[in-house]
Image (tube, rainbow, N blue to C red):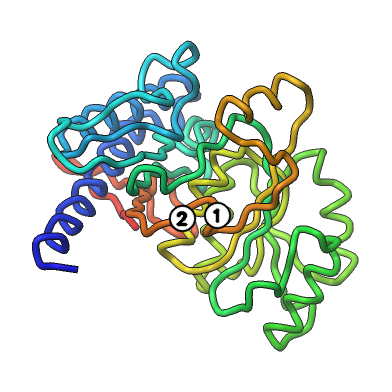
Amino acid sequence: MNTNSQFQDRLLSLGLARVSEAAALASARLIGHGDEKAADQAAVNAMREQLNLLEISGVVVIGEGERDEAPMLYIGEEVGTGKGPGVDIALDPLEGTTLTAKDMPNALTVIAMGPRGSMLHAPDVYMNKLAIGPGYSADTVTLDMKPAKRVTELAKAKGCEPSDITVCILERPRHDTVIDAVRSTGASIRLITDGDVAGVMHCADASTGIDMYMGTGGAPEGVLAAAALKCMGGQIYGQLQFRNSDEKMRAAKAGITDLDRIYTRDDMVTQDVIFAATGVTAGSLLAAVQREPGWLTCETL
């Protein structure tokens, strides 16, 4: 990589951090106010404003929804000044709107940027996800395994007992059988109420104590999580889940033809990307936005 390219990547990295931080600072003013929509809109407005200052020709591929569903940062929206490199953007201006409204842990702002065509254009459907941190072989755990076997296989690879494994799972009724199966091995479970991008990211940071993430959540969030692990290390597997013909049509519209495919991290994010996440509320990964008279501080990954 030549010096000019390295310099440009550095500028874009810093610029993307500013985008993430702007969204976090804007939404932080509404922490604990009980208004999810207002917090999300504040983050969207700030993120879009900062994105349009970047010297890029960007297109949103993972965003706030289809054009008829979201007035800003919709899928297909062009962002940036239009004078820089052509890039795809995946974003969630506020991952954890409920967490922010209720002042609960692990609300984040999240954004990823990569070359055109580098990120899966995931439709707004569910995805069955499985993630582990760095340092394991590619076949250590798979989506084809039963939840209990995933725990025992990961424990074997880690050189510990299943009781030493901690699994992060989104607390939803649909996960009750998964939770029971994991607990039957003696493993611990950390339940989260929202924010499965953060849940996956925990696997890549040993200090969080999370070894594995599993369960179904949004497919767009799965791509964002894959972008995070592309930078942080670790593996994620995802398989789209369809509840009706309308959701299958969304997949077809996004260019997906193999509805049963299991995607790896490198299938979802095929090239190097730039990723940024900023803490909004206090969490295991990132500190909350701190407010003092006359100034604000935040922490960005």
Q: Nearer the viewer, residue 116 or 292?
A: 116
Q: Residue at x 15, y 53 (%)?
A: 11
Task: Write the residue at 36% across / 39% down.
Answer: 89
Q: Is residue 10 left or right of residue 31?
A: left
Figure quadrant of residue 246: top right
Residue 177 relative to residue 191: left or right: right
Three-letter amino acid code at the position of disc 1: Asp
Residue shown at the point (41%, 38%) measured from the top left: 91
Q: Is residue 12 above or below residue 41?
A: below
State how far apart marks 2 and 1 are (Cα).
6 Å
Which numbered circle lies on residue 270? Answer: 2
Q: Residues within 10 Å of mark 1 (few under 14, many from 20)?
A: some
Q: Are marks 2 and 1 in contact (CB under 8 Å)?
A: yes
How many numbered marks have been drawn onto this rendered protein structure? 2
Residue bearing mark 1: 267
The three-letter amino acid code for the residue at tag 2 is Thr
Q: Residue furthest top?
A: 68
Residue 217: quadrant of the picture: top right
